Structures are given as C-alpha cells and as structure tokens.
C-alpha cells in the first residue's frame, strides 16, 4: 500500500480517470457552453469528434463517442445547448460511459483545487491521442478516412484549442506557437508525437515559476531524468529517439492505470 502511494507520487503514469475526466469536462463544459457552433467551429468539432471516436479508449466498448460523432457529422450548425442535450441523452442511453465522479483526478490532481486538473488532463489526452495514432492502435475502420494524414490528431487539437478551450490566453499562445513551429508540416505520425512534446516543453519553460505553477508539481523539461535516464545525451541535449520511445511507452493504451475507478 505504502509502496503504491510512493510510486504514485514519484511515478509518471497515465490514468484512465484523468483521461475520462478531461473528456467529460470538454464535452459537458466547453463545447456545450458555446452559443452557436457553425462554419469553422463546426469543422473543428467534426475533426475533434472523429479523432475521439477513433482513438479515445472508453471502456467496455462503449459507442458513446461514435454516436455523438455520427449525429454531429450530419449537421452544419447547432447550438451548444443542442450539443449538450445530445451528449446528455447519449450518455444516459450508453450508461455507464464514465467510471468515476466528475472532476476527479489522479495524475492531474493539484495540491489544492486551484491547480492542475482540466488543463493537465487536456494535455494528457492529446499526448495519448498522438501516441496511439502513431502506434496505429486503430479502434475501428473509420480511422482510415484520416489515417493518411500524419497531422490528423494535431489538426483536431489545434481546432479544438482555438475554438473551444476556455482559457483564451492559452489558446492564443498555442495557436501562435503552432504557426511558428509549423504544426501542419509534420511528415509522419512519430513527428507529430514529438511536435506536441516539444510544444508542451516550450509552454512548460514559459510557465516555470509562474503564479499558476503548483508548488508541489514544478514545470520541468519533460521527461525527468529519473523517469527516463536515456532521454538525454551526456551533454544534456535530447536523445529524441529515446524520448519517442518513452512517450510511446507512457501514453500507450497498454500503460493505462485503472486506479480510482470502479
Ligand atoms: P501540465 O503542463 O498540464 O502537463 C500535464 C502532464 O503532462 C504532466 O504532469 C506530465 O506528466 C506530462 N507532460 C509535461 N510535459 C510534457 C511534454 N513535454 N510531453 C509529454 N508529456 C508532458 N497556462 C498558462 O498559464 N498560460 C498559458 O499560456 C497556457 N497555455 C496552455 C496551452 C494549452 C494547449 C494547454 C492544454 C494548457 C495551457 N496552459 C497554460 C495550462 C498549463 O500548460 C498547464 O496545463 C497547467 O499549468 C497545469 O500544469 P501541470 O503541472 O498539471 O502540468
């Protein structure tokens, strides 16, 4: 028991509860709060739902995301309220979709409620999506429609952040960085995994020492040497091959921990 607590503190793990809490918050609190969804916003929503339906690992083969995707795919416009209703009724019909109570976090738990949580969950979810896309852990044939585009998951993330992410400053920073770092130029799915890793480290560097930093979870250049000793060369520069290997290990479906859920 004590060892488990220790490894939770020092380990670098991927938790199903964090993924589900991020998904639930995104659907019920961000997309649902939009006044109207049409044009580019609707395009962003279509791409996001396509990626989620194909790569989000809901348990028990739940088709919740596929159903929402299929209904929304046929629409050019809807209100956030209509989306919210669709998500609610589908969730009731497909119950149980989620394993824990809302806003529960393990890997993304802050030392107080004002730290971490959803933004951490969203990063985690997108790393998980880029990695399992690269590992070609296709959940269904549907993925064939976009599996030819190595930037498909990044494109969905870019659209989601720019359109729905509630932190407007974060979204503006991210979209600007995406332009500078040429997000859509990635040539392979592995490059997409590394693109997001690099971008996240750039954000970590910018926010290191910021008021928003949880004093018990400092912003580091990830991964920490103790978790991946081979990820840095002796001169401290990145060994990207090893970083990729580490990311593919940490964020793979196979590594997901089911602590804290029924
Ligand atoms: P997070 O940075 O949220 O990271 C979550 C987890 O991902 C970490 O615990 C770690 O396990 C893993 N991780 C960390 N770095 C990497 C990496 N490079 N590659 C792979 N995995 C990694 N906040 C602001 O105040 N200003 C901003 O401009 C801002 N922009 C943001 C943009 C986006 C797109 C997002 C999703 C969030 C943004 N945030 C911003 C929030 C901020 O980045 C953190 O999410 C928040 O401060 C919580 O930090 P955290 O310590 O939980 O770790």
Image (cartoon, rainbow, N blue to C red):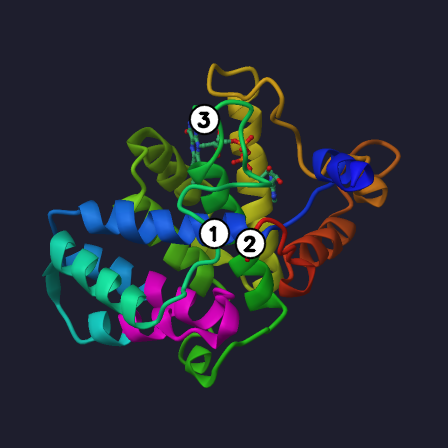
Looking at the image, which is closer to me, 109 or 223?
109
Q: Is residue 151 above or below residue 113?
A: below
Task: Give the numbered dot on residue 108.
Answer: none
Percent of width and height locating residue 100: 47, 51
Q: Is residue 261 above or below residue 232?
A: below
Label 3: how many residues lie within 10 Å, few (<14), some (14-19) or many (20+)? few
Q: Secondary structure at mark 2?
A: loop
- Report the side of 217 relative to 228 (left or right): left
State whether label 1 is within 8 Å of ligand 1: no
Task: Give the numbered dot on residue 261.
Answer: 2
Residue at mark 1: 100
Label 2: how many residues lie within 10 Å, few (<14), some (14-19) or many (20+)? few
Percent of width and height locating residue 90: 27, 68
Q: Secondary structure at mark 1?
A: loop
For the residues labelled 1 and 2, the Cα–Cα distance comes to 5 Å
Label 1: how many residues lie within 10 Å, few (<14), some (14-19) or many (20+)? some
Residue at mark 3: 113
């Amino acid at each position: 028991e004590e060892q488990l607590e220790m490894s939770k503190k020092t380990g670098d793990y991927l938790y199903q509860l964090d993924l589900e809490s991020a998904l639930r918050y995104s659907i019920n609190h961000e997309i649902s709060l939009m006044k109207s969804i049409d044009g580019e916003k609707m395009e962003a929503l279509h791409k996001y739902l396509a990626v989620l339906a194909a790569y989000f690992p809901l348990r028990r083969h739940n088709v919740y995301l596929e159903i929402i995707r299929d209904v929304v795919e046929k629409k050019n416009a809807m209100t956030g309220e209509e989306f919210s209703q669709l998500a609610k009724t589908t969730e009731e019909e497909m119950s149980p979709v989620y394993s824990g109570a809302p806003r529960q976090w393990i890997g993304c738990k802050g030392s107080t409620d004002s730290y971490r949580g959803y933004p951490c969950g969203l990063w985690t979810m997108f790393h998980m999506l880029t990695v399992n896309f690269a590992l070609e852990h296709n959940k269904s044939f549907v993925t064939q429609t976009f599996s030819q585009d190595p930037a498909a998951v990044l494109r969905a993330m870019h659209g989601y952040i720019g359109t729905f992410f509630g932190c407007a400053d974060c979204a503006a920073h991210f979209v600007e960085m995406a332009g500078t770092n040429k997000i859509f130029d990635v040539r392979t799915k592995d490059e997409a995994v590394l693109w997001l890793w690099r971008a996240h480290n750039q954000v970590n560097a910018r926010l290191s020492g910021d008021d928003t930093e949880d004093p018990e979870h400092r912003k580091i250049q990830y991964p920490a040497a103790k978790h991946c000793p081979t990820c840095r060369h002796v001169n401290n520069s990145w060994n990207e091959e090893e970083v990729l290997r580490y990311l593919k290990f940490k964020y793979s479906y196979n590594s997901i921990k089911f602590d804290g859920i029924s």
